[in-house]
Image (cartoon, rainbow, N blue to C red):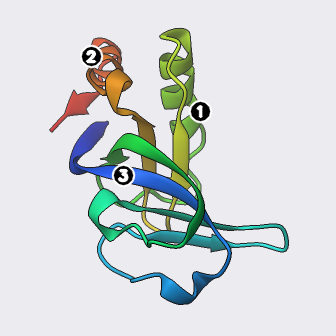
Amino acid sequence: MTIEVLEKEFCVCRLKSPGNVSIKEFTFLSVTDEEISLVCTKENMPNDTETVEKGWRGFRIKGVLDFSLIGILSKISAILAKGNIGIFAVSTYNTDYIFVKKENFDKALQLLKANDYTVI
């Protein structure tokens, strides 16, 4: 399986309102009955965040994943958990995105390569 590195730095935010969110490339917005969460690039972070966790780097599973595929995200998260690396995962219709703190990013990629993932 191929992992594609995303070159930008990301933020994970909690918002009071989705009103000021600029929908640009790599914007993940979730609205539930309990919260409004946003994952975005550092340069697209709104000024009025309630709380923010900066310093995330990301990668995605290359290609379109069929919904019948099982265990892809769990295998990656298990590899990273064994390396003591926490993740923040986002799934879209096509694929999965995995974010790790930037200080763990190189180690995460090394672990994935050591477990037969191709990293581009």
Q: Residue at x 39, y 82 (%)?
A: 23
Of helix, strand and loop, which one carries label 3?
strand
Q: Name the residue under label 2.
A: 110
From the image, state whether disc 2 or disc 3 is nearer to you.
3
Q: Which amino acid does label 3 sit on?
A: Phe
| Residue 115 locus on image (x, y percent) | 35, 15
Q: In which quarter of the image is residue 2?
A: top left
Q: Residue at x 47, y 81 (%)?
A: 21
| Residue 83 locus on image (x, y percent) | 48, 10
Q: How far apart are marks 2 and 1 (CA)?
A: 18 Å
Q: Which residue is drawn at 44% across and 72% down?
A: 46
From the image, state whether disc 3 or disc 1 is nearer to you.
3
Q: How far apart are marks 3 and 1 (CA)?
A: 22 Å
Q: Callout 3 environment at 10 Å: few (<14), some (14 to 19), or many (20+)?
A: many
Q: Mark 1 points at which residue?
A: 74
Closer-to-camera residue (77/46): 46
Q: What residue type is labelled 2?
A: Gln
